[in-house]
Image: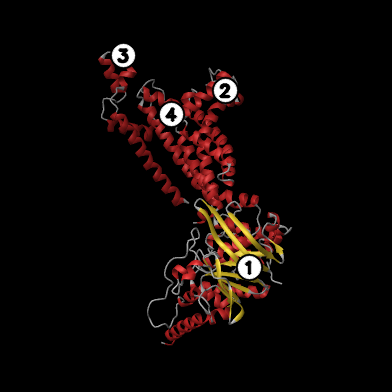
């Protein structure tokens, strides 16, 4: 059974200018031990989706509908106390910026112990033992000397390790990582990703890796969803997605990956800006930036349809199969050609 | 720490010179004759001249300033009043406790009111409670202390007879010629001035605390705490409060230091014999030594309280403690 199942999730924010539809009709499932990569630009709704899953949005501002099942239990509309007891124990979350995600006036030991004490009826001493264990597990050197240090005494990478330790201290079944490496330098990024992968294996966790970095997805994910304008625009196994992406936005994402051996030239980019969620474009949200826009794209949102290459490969696009296959072949030839050159 | 202290002391000396020189300059610009006031209207020109000479008023202003510095450094004295030859040191020593009673008592009043109200307002922004609170805040900020004081004194003191209308009693019994004394009478006479102070400052502090709490609640680490499963109560107590009250400590220190230099309006309304009233009287009679004395004293208060704030901050915020 899927440990996390989200169906037809919609999240809107009430603002002074009207309703902002941040997430609409998002569905996916995450099995234990699996990694789901969630890719998209800023404002594509990927973070909001998982803040909704965690129940971390202010109910006075956010309108939520759909279904979020954790081990078969419905989370939307659940009692706040029940939500709190699952948060941090059954489902942990780490955030993008480790510099601001830890309380600056409390020692990291205190913050780790707090995570234990909220969910378990143990003494502070026992919680401290657990905190020391988990700090060792996330490879913080001399943990017993550093446990009483404050966040500002740690580097960004070390702070992100502390964040991971805090999310994992109660052995959750699911870990949501919201761009965990975006704020870190490249060498540290690799270390943190390796750490997450190792811990996932040891604890058999389901991991959601929210990122805008397709490299991270290629490295870690089993399943990928691509989000655009608050909607899932493509969903596939990681190999399928890289082998035959089915819609222009995903082509653009893959095309804008830097290659070390590319023959000079500028990095490809997707022209234009992400869509406004307040006044979303009609029809397909990507049509204002798409090279292949047809009349129908301006009128109708394409349904999620199955790809010919695989049962579990879903995408939204009005282009017919033949055109998509041809365009991707050309794009691929271009990419490979560049690589060869 | 030593380095920090030395820098502080140099800064204090610099501030002392700036504040006193400005006081002397302003005094020099005002075209009145303190000697005339001290001597009385019927004084003969010879008597006036001798008074001028005694008060050094026949000398240029920078010489007067030099005498002031000399007295302070050599004799450790702030000089004597032009009007009644009383020592400024003893005048300040007598008046400062009155002002301190007002300021510290008032601070306890306004903090006990504004911290909970500010937090409640922040918890439910734009709610009815928040809007009502903000209306009162606006009134409190806009109203003048003299007006607040007079209204309180009229309604609560004069009409309802619940408190004295004005006046002061010493906290410690035993001073000669006092009409009333002792802690109970002291507090009884101070209630209205404290409430006046409270209305004045609570308004500012509710706004400040509300803004800080709101800002802190949107911090990433507060989201982290919620993601850990912390309850609203725990989030507020352990993650929001300490962080959002840090800036309040700074403002409080500045306000206390400043107010100790004389809460002029409140003291005048309630005829409290504090520094503020003293300085108003001194302006009336151009009594430069008293004015300068109060300026020096309040500069000292501001410096001392800023220092206390810095030290307290070190205890409250580990980022400052260690760097």
Which chain is mark 1 on? A
Q: Which residue is mark 3?
A: B41
Q: Please tell me the numbered disc located at residue B143.
A: none
3D distance between C-alphas at marks 1 and 2: 62 Å
SS of the residue under disc 4: helix
Q: Which residue is mark 4?
A: B89
Which residue, as the protein is rendered here, is positioned at the far bottom? Answer: A340
Q: Compared to A6, does B41 lie above or below?
A: above
Q: Nearer the viewer, mark 3 or mark 4?
A: 3
Question: From the viewer's perspective, is B213 left or right of A199?
Answer: left
Which quadrant of the view contains residue A115?
bottom right
Q: Earlier in the sequence, mark 3 or mark 2?
A: 3
Q: Which residue is found at the position 68% from the left and 54% from the top?
A: A80
Which chain is mark 3 on? B
Q: Position of residue B104 (x, y in %)?
A: 54, 34
Q: Which residue is found at the position 49% from the left and 70% from the top?
A: A296
Q: Are marks 1 and 4 in contact (CB under 8 Å)?
A: no
* Quadrant that contains the C terminus of chain A: bottom left
3D distance between C-alphas at marks 3 and 4: 28 Å
Which residue, as the protein is rendered here, is positioned at the far right? Answer: A121
Q: Which residue is mark 2?
A: B156
Q: Are marks 1 and 2 in contact (CB under 8 Å)?
A: no
3D distance between C-alphas at marks 3 and 1: 89 Å
């Amino acid at each position: 059974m899927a440990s996390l199942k989200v169906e037809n999730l919609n999240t809107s924010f009430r603002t002074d200018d009207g309703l902002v539809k941040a997430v609409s009709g998002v569905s996916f499932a995450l099995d234990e031990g699996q990694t789901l990569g969630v890719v998209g630009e800023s404002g594509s709704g990927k973070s909001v989706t998982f803040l909704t899953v965690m129940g971390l949005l202010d109910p006075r501002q956010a309108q939520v509908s759909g279904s979020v099942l954790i081990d078969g239990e419905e989370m939307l509309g659940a009692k706040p106390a029940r939500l709190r007891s699952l948060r941090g124990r059954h489902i942990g979350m780490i955030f993008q910026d480790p510099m601001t995600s830890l309380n600056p006036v409390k020692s990291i030991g205190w913050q780790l112990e707090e995570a234990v004490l909220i969910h378990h009826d143990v003494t502070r001493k026992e919680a401290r033992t657990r905190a020391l264990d988990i700090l060792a597990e996330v490879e913080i050197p001399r943990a017993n000397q550093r446990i009483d240090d404050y966040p500002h005494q740690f580097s960004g990478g070390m702070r992100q390790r502390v964040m991971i330790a805090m999310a994992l201290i109660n052995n959750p079944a699911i870990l949501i990582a919201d761009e965990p490496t975006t704020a870190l330098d490249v060498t540290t990024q690799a270390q943190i990703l390796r750490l997450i992968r190792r811990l996932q294996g040891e604890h058999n966790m389901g991991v959601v890796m929210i990122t805008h970095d397709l490299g991270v997805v290629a490295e870690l994910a089993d399943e990928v969803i691509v989000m655009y304008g608050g909607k899932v625009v493509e969903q596939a196994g990681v190999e399928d997605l890289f082998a035959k992406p089915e819609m222009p936005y995903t082509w653009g994402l893959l095309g804008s990956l830097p290659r070390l051996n590319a023959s000079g030239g500028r990095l490809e980019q997707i022209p234009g800006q992400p869509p406004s969620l307040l006044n979303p474009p009609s029809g397909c949200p990507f049509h204002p930036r798409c090279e292949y826009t047809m009349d129908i794209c301006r009128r109708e949102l394409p349904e999620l349809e199955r790809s010919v290459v695989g049962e579990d490969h879903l995408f939204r696009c009005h282009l017919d199969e033949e055109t998509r296959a041809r365009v991707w072949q050309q794009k691929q030839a271009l990419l490979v050609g560049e690589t060869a050159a | 720490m030593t380095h920090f202290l030395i820098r502080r002391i140099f800064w204090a000396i610099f501030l002392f010179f700036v504040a006193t020189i400005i006081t002397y300059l302003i005094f020099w610009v005002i075209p009145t004759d303190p000697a005339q006031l001290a001597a009385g209207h019927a004084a003969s020109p010879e008597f006036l001249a001798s008074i001028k000479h005694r008060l050094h008023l026949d000398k240029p202003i920078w010489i007067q300033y030099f005498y002031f510095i000399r007295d302070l450094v050599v004799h450790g004295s702030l000089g004597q009043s032009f009007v009644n030859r009383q020592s400024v040191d003893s005048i300040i020593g007598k008046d400062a406790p009155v002002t301190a009673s007002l300021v510290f008592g008032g601070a306890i009043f306004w903090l006990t009111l504004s911290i909970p109200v500010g937090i409640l307002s922040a918890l439910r922004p734009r709610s009815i409670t928040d809007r009502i609170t903000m209306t009162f805040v606006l009134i409190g900020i806009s109203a003048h202390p003299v007006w607040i004081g007079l209204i309180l004194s009229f309604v609560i003191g004069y009409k309802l007879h619940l408190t004295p209308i004005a006046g002061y009693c010493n906290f410690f019994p035993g001073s000669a010629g006092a009409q009333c004394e002792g802690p109970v009478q002291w507090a009884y006479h101070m209630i209205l001035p404290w409430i006046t102070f409270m209305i004045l400052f609570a308004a500012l502090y509710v706004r400040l605390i509300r803004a800080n709490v709101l800002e802190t609640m949107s911090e990433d680490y507060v989201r982290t705490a919620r993601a850990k499963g912390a309850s609203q109560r725990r989030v507020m107590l352990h993650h929001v409060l300490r962080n959002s009250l840090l800036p309040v400590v700074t403002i409080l220190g500045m306000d206390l230091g400043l107010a100790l230099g004389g809460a002029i309006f409140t003291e005048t309304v309630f005829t409290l014999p504090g520094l503020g009233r003293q300085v108003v009287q001194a302006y009336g009679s151009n009594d430069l030594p008293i004015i300068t004395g109060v300026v020096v004293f309040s500069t000292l208060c501001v410096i001392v309280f800023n220092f206390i704030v810095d030290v307290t901050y070190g205890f409250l915020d580990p980022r400052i403690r260690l760097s």
